[in-house]
Image: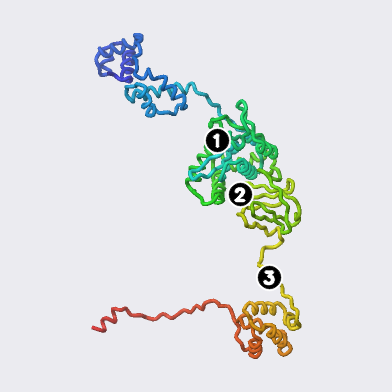
Amino acid sequence: MKSAREKLNILNAYQELGSYRAAAALCGTTHKTVRRVVERRTQPASEQPARPRKTDPHRGLITDKVRATDGRISAKRLLPLCRAAGYDGSARSLRRAVAEAKAAWRTQRRTYRPWLPTPGEHLVIDWGETADGRQIFCAVLAWSRFRFVRFADDQRQATTLRLLAECFETLAGVPAVVLADRMGCLKGGVVANVVVPAQGYVAFAAHYGFRPDFCEAADPESKGVVEHLVGYAKADLVAGQGPWATIDGANVAAISWCTEVNGRLHSEIAAVPADRLTTERALLRRLPSLRPAIGARQTRKVDGLRTVRCGSARYSVPGAFIGARVELAVSGGELTIFVGTAEIARHRLVGPGELSLLDEHYGRPARAPLRAVRPKTAAELAFLALGPVAEAFLRAAAAAGTSRLAHELSELADLERAHGRQALLAALERALAFGRFRAADVRSILAAGAGVPRLRAAGQPLAVELPAVPVRELADYAEGLR
């Protein structure tokens, strides 16, 4: 049989020469072949009835499965179903029938119009789950493609709103619309396919000034930009750096990863998302000065120790609120303390029986308790009048268990009249350094005077260059023994 190219060459040669034999000589064939090709070209094609196929009785099954899977099912998966339905043809014939059904389905399925996002308009959010059970929160600012990823232990409403507030603070603004999946933590119900947001989400949206919106049910294509981010974060961040021992460690890695990917050129928009955010930030709504209270609040009274009790643990507050009624809100492993709408303190949650104290609430850092020295007798007053050295000597002598310490202090105070104040202070410092707390020891130090050695810190090592000395090899000694 002649190929299509050979038949075309024969027809061109016949049109140029007008002779069967001349065209045959030019194309290297016979004049009969040229005549047959020309006649078939000029005669109308006869309509032949379509031959029945073995896949025809099962065309309805194939079409239904292709439609149900949105054209994703393969002929390999369909073959056992068709065999059970009585198909006895080959797998190749079934592949051809499935390909035809998919081609027909593509012409009938819904069509898409590219979405052109508006700057400052949409923020798309969604939750995902990692292989180790961690929840991953993802958000994308649609126009700039700026990405926000954080990890959490659950997908509750308080956690979602806390991370959404953190996202707004990272963006330094609030978009006009927050588009979310129909996640159960944010929806209060569905009426005639219209989602009713939960009351807590409505109050949160009113505080920040955005409009909550929800995607169609079971329709991931309507929020593909954030669906892609969830998969990207799992494949790159989690697979490349995880798992992490704690949520805090995972979020530190997530912040670093977001900084990296937002600083790279985005292939879809051919721009850097961080640079686009700088432009889009001017169109975002102003961020409120305070976060709203998320979750249920508890009321407590500040006690005299400047603390409030929550979950059998104590948390500090500024001293100006002693005796005042405050409200506590727990969210995302943190306890926030409010007076009205103003936040006055924030703590990480601690276990029952533990304390979380902030130094700024007490005006100084924590220090070990120290008992005050209160002299009463004349000997104690005379000795402690020598100053801080005498007080340090007294505390060290008491800690060492010095017997008859009161008598020793009386003798030490009398030494000032014989040797002078400065000499006695120097002797007390030396006795304190060597742990000698008897009056006789201090008297011996005073008697030695300036002849006693002084302790000094070790200095720098002395570097001495040694002269080079000629050496002999061991083989030279072996020759002398022979």
What is the quadrant of residue 410 in the picture?
A: bottom right
Quarter placement of the C terminus: bottom left
For the question of whether residue 167 can be seen, the reply is no
Kind of residue at badge 2: Gly
- Residue indicated by mark 2: 333
The residue that appears at 66% across and 86% down in the rendered structure is 439
Quarter placement of the N terminus: top left
In the rendered image, residue 247, in percent from the top left (x then y), is placed at 55, 49
Which of the two discs, 1 and 2, labels the residue nearer the N terminus? 1
In the rendered image, residue 307, in percent from the top left (x then y), is placed at 70, 56
For the question of whether residue 196 can be seen, the reply is yes
Tell me the distance, in whole angstroms, between the alpha carbons under discs 1 and 2. Answer: 30 Å
Taking depth in this image into account, of 126 and 197 the one nearest to the observer is 197
Taking depth in this image into account, of 451 and 145 the one nearest to the observer is 451
What is the quadrant of residue 223 in the picture?
A: top right
In the rendered image, residue 26, in percent from the top left (x then y), is placed at 27, 17
Label 1 element class: helix
Kind of residue at badge 1: Val
Kind of residue at badge 3: Leu
Which of the two discs, 1 and 3, labels the residue nearer the N terminus? 1
Mark 1 neighbour density, 10 Å: few (under 14) some (14–19) many (20 or more)? some
Evaluate if marks 3 and 2 touch, with contact meaning CB atoms under 8 Å apart: no
- Residue indicated by mark 1: 225
Q: Which mark is residue 434?
A: none
